[in-house]
Image (cartoon, rainbow, N blue to C red):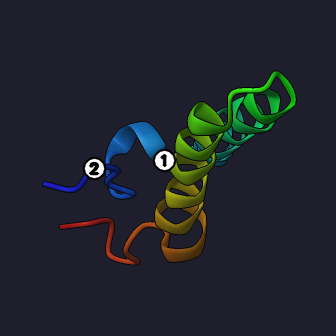
Amino acid sequence: MKLLDPNDPFFRRPAIRWGTVILPSVMGAAEFVWGGPGWGILFAAAGAYAFWMLIIKGPDQDGGT
């Protein structure tokens, strides 16, 4: 089981994939600004992982079957 499965039907729409990337990334930046570097690192890492899995790697061409 993957933490984020790009072949899951939930991630079919590009807006959902991008939202899953942008939301933790923005929260990570906000945590750095607000003085919480530990949380900032965690949220930034979650955003980077989501970017790798959902945008760069993306769903399989055959739809995951």
Farthest-out residue, top = 34
Q: Residue at x 49, y 75 (%)?
A: 57
Farthest-out residue, right = 33
Three-letter residue code for mark 1: Arg
**Counting other residues with Cα less than 10 Å from the Cα at mark 2, is it few (<14), some (14-19), or many (20 or more)?**
few
In the picture of the structure, the residue carrying the numbered disc 1 is 12
Give whichever of 42, 11 is nearer the camera.
Answer: 42
Three-letter residue code for mark 2: Leu
Image quarter (top left, top right, bottom left or bottom right) of the N terminus: bottom left
Vertical position of residue 58 compared to residue 21: above or below: below
Of the residues tagged 2 and 1, which is closer to the observer? 2
- Residue 58 lies, in percent from the top left, at 49, 68
- Residue 8 lies, in percent from the top left, at 32, 47
Is residue 16 visible in this depiction of the protein?
no
Q: How many marks?
A: 2
In the picture of the structure, the residue carrying the numbered disc 2 is 3
Q: Regarding mark 2 in the picture, which secondary structure is present there?
A: loop
Image quarter (top left, top right, bottom left or bottom right) of the C terminus: bottom left
**Counting other residues with Cα less than 10 Å from the Cα at mark 1, is it few (<14), some (14-19), or many (20 or more)?**
some
Q: In terms of sequence position, does the residue under pointer 2 or pointer 1 come before the other?
A: 2
The part of the image, by quadrant, that contains residue 33 is top right
Vertical position of residue 63 compared to residue 36: above or below: below
Give whichever of 45, 9 is nearer the camera.
Answer: 45
